[in-house]
Amino acid sequence: MPIQVLQPRVVSKISAGEVVERPASVVKELIENAIDANASEIRIEIRQGGRRLIRVSDNGCGIPQAEVALAFARHATSKISSEEDLSHVTTLGFRGEALASVAAVAQVSMISHASGEESGTLLRVEGGEIVHSEKHGGRTGTVITVENLFYNTPARLKFLRSEATESTRIVELASAYALAYPELSFYLTDHGRLVLQTSGSGKLHDVLITVFGLETAEQMLEAQTLEHQPAADRAPSAAVPGQGIVVTGFVGSPSLHRATRNYQMFFVNRRWIQDRSLSFAAEEAYRTLLPVGRHPVTVLSIHMPTTDVDVNVHPTKREVRFREPREVFSAVQRVVRRTVIGQAPVAQASSQPIPLVSEEWARHQTVSLPLGASRVQIALEAQRTADMAPPGVVSAPMLERLPMLRVLGQVRQTYIIAEGPDGLYLIDQHAAHERILFEQLQSEQKAMSVSSQALLEPLTLELSPQQRGLIDPMLPQLTSFGFDLTSFGGDTYLIRAIPSALSPEHVRSVITELLDLSREGTEATVPYEALDIIACHSAVRAGQILTLEESRELIQQLEKTTSPYTCPHGRPTMIHLSSTQLEKSFGRR
Ligand code: ADP
Ligand code: MG
């Protein structure tokens, strides 16, 4: 084919794809427009995961009659006018693309009434063409209704996930904006059912309670903002890059941690963004305070001069580019660290099991032993540094089965110390028990006979708006794990039975993690990780005193497992000091 410039209709569908990936992208653009219009109240209504219908109503400034049609033209915006403006964007929108993009791939109608005008306008747009326009009454503000999304782009439609998943994305998105704008009132319904409502009180902690639930919100600490930059003094000073960065918000105390990074939210100048390095900076601040493989909960707002951050990187504006990324990361890290160290009950967190050695170690079963120090001391040191130095590395062959062990006692209420045919073994009681329970659950589930215990008093479970959408599709799987859950109306569920190994006090955390997993995981990984979540929460913890009898029982069960040397995460369950190592270090060889 010869080269030709594409028809505007084709171009608009191509560009629409950049902005409108899924129903949640539409909701995002419409919420942002409402915020930019200075609304104090934003109502969102969705049906069928947003595919059938998305309606966003606001009480913002509205669009003047003369401009309504123009709002749907590509690159038409009231928010910037010159190239210069691009370097200090203060609104969420500025590209003038959203309405045009949405209208290209859905049936859209808009009622808008500008403040100061006598009447408003009703406009209908289909496949990018204005098909109807008339005068319309109503209060000041804008109502946009988007129906049958992707009706004319079947390829897109195929990429949508289930209705429940798309709804959850929308709830998450609305929750994120509610967190970024606590002074605005958000109201979201799904098929007429209220799923999210914030008061607009301006208090972030109120929104945390709504979004994460009271139990989680109570474990969040208010960020300790830099002392010499009081809140009143937050005027952006463009003079020195990196100066004038203020980090506010809440972070979880170290006792609050999750299996995924879904609970980490970052806002830059009140824009919800995704940036792995910010996550990394926050997680660094928790170093040694959280169990390995667990992630903190963060809701952090970074306020900085608009000239120091480029928001024009991606059509969806979810990514930004910092002029001085290092300054931003270290500001986040400092604030989080100070908050966590300053207010957190650290002892609680450090009683969590920390694996003795690195995963690398688990794979090779090698022990590094600088000569001359106490072996047990070295092993415990290794736990702290997770760094096995190269000198004197002794490799043991990968053993499949555990030899018979004689239990000698317990060290630090965490490790069982035992003697075997070839030397000494230190066994992490939690990791070992997790392995045992995991394999038991796995074989029970294969045989479809997971043992379950009925609770005398049913437990009630309050779900957050996000969780609500995920639980129904998960019920069959929960049943197969030994749970008996029934809806008790609204967001409340009753739990009548739980897996036998699990203690009732851990049920809520287990369900939270299982729901996180069902959102994140793939079909292949979910069953494995789900069983591990149950095993991990059911296992004996570090800090628990075991009698000799209990320790023996644990070791006997560990001997029966197929992979006794690692926990299901792949971390070691034990370290082994061979007779040769012992002899060498005592100078007997
Ligand atoms: P952008 O937000 O990047 O300017 P949009 O396509 O989202 O582009 O919107 C185009 C224009 O329509 C906006 O610049 C604004 O003037 C107007 N507009 C859109 N939604 C609203 C709303 N809810 N209230 C008031 N004006 C709106
Ligand atoms: Mg916009």
Image (cartoon, rainbow, N blue to C red):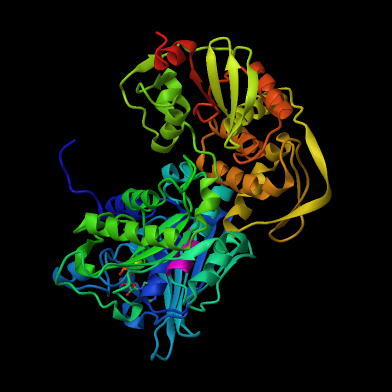
**x then y, percent, for residue 135:** 44, 82
Residue at 83% of width from left, 42% of height from top?
454
**x then y, percent, for residue 98:** 34, 62
Query: Do we see residue 464 in this rendering?
Result: yes
- Measured along the vertical axis of the image, is residue 26 above or below residue 476? below
Relative depth, front residue between 411 and 164: 411
**x then y, percent, for residue 556:** 69, 19
**x then y, percent, for residue 447:** 73, 22
- Measured along the vertical axis of the image, is residue 350 above or below residue 79? above
Residue at 55% of width from left, 42% of height from top?
517
Main structural element of the magenta stretch: helix, strand or loop?
helix
Query: Do we see residue 45 in this rendering?
Result: no
Q: Is residue 221 left or right of residue 467?
A: left
**Which image quadrant: the C terminus?**
top left
Q: Is residue 461 left or right of residue 362?
A: right
Which stretch did the figure color magenta? 173-180
